Image: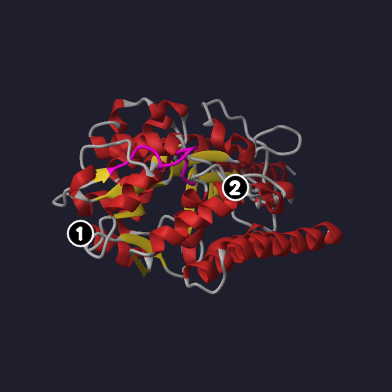
Amino acid sequence: MIRNLLTGLMLVFLFQACTDQSSRHSTLQFIHFWTEPQQQLLIDSLISEFEDLNPTIKIEQIPVQWSEGKTKLLLAHASGNPPDITHIGIEWAQEFIDNGIFLPLDVYDSIPSQCLEHVKGKDGRIYCQPWTLNTRALIITHDAFLNDDTVTWDDILASLNEQHLIGMNSTEPHNVTKKYLPILWAYGSRLFQNLPFSSTCDSTLIDGFLLLKKLIVNARIDQSRRLDEFLVNRSITLGISGQWILPQLKNTPHRVLPRMPGKSGASILSGDCLGISVSSKYAKEAKAFVNFITKYGRVKQFCSRLQDIGLPAHENAWKDPSFHLNADQSNFTMQCMNSIMLPSPSYYLDAEGILEDHIMSFIYGNIDEQAVCSSLKKQLQLLEAKQKKGS
């Protein structure tokens, strides 16, 4: 009898030990888009540091490409076994939040006002932790403007000729929106800045398309990567690009403007954030990892080492000397601070496709400024009516 009792006690002890051991070790799945070689090295180093500090937590990476986009993430969350932590563009966050995919978070850091509403739920709580922000600025290699931060579109138009060209994007999903909207906003248009999108197709938009018409006369139209190359070798004398181009411009005389020419001075603000699956078995551990990897000091180091990442999604970044070390970096920081994050309803990609089709049709001379504004408004109204009916 004593032997049976001891055996029973030993089995209970072993079962409890195994249970305790399994409860102390958690493996979190982390799906992320930062898969470029240098980005991946930094992600690896941050995960290693976290695991050293938290030996009972392991992070399993699921790298995906930006080209796979939001669809890949939606499929991952619909699979029944979603990742614990998801890296998404802030522009996509609202759809995920509205669909109840993420847990609410306790965020204590100062979130920049431009992206705050994009990470909130209808209950006012924050469901995604902002991580980084980035934008595109106007870069000029024309000798006449190398010492001038206050260039106007009239100055630019006066400088353009057969030898001095502006780079304009050809058909290229998403980049068309990011490159052309800041120009269309030049004379007061708020196209795509508010919902419903159709309401932003007003008379001020015509002036924006008239500016585009004038710029096209002396434009080189190509894909984004080619336009960056043309800026570097001065085949074009100005174009809109991101912070990633700065190392390539090291030996090219140039000027990054701190604000877009025009009334608002705004460009488009983009960014990255992290969300925790509502079905995660390890919510506490996932929150610990998100808090760790989005801590301002770590993101600052991340962005300082890889300029193409942008800035930390934290108000401290605007005035941090680390992001004002030189004129280029400072002016990109200023442009980022003065940029706008577009609303992102569930039908955003369809609306963006309509916008980009109209812009390119205008660029290639298939429609005039009056007709493009009218047609754009009508097609957006049809899309919005369809969405409203479906809801």
State whether residue 62 is above or below residue 11: below
Q: Residue at x 21, y 58 (%)?
A: 232
State whether residue 316 is above or below residue 16: above
Q: Are the residues flagged by discs 1 and 2 in contact, CB closer than 8 Å?
A: no
Q: Residue at x 53, y 64 (%)?
A: 359
Range of magenta residues: 256-268
Residue matched to label 2: 204
Q: Quadrant of the C terminus?
A: bottom right
In the rendered image, residue 367, in percent from the top left (x then y), is placed at 57, 70
Q: Which of the pair 333/307 is nearer the observer? A: 333
Secondary structure of the residue carrying tag 1 is loop
- Look at the magenta stretch and give its main secondary structure: loop
Q: Which of the pair 386/305 is nearer the observer? A: 386
- Please give left or right for residue 228 compared with residue 351 in the image: left
Secondary structure of the residue carrying tag 2 is helix
State whether residue 134 is above or below residue 29: above
- Please give left or right for residue 123 compared with residue 73 in the image: right
Q: Which of the pair 169/245 is nearer the observer? A: 169
In the rendered image, residue 316, in percent from the top left (x then y), is placed at 42, 26
Amino acid identity at mark 1: Arg
Residue matched to label 1: 234
Q: CA distance from mark 1 to mark 2?
A: 33 Å
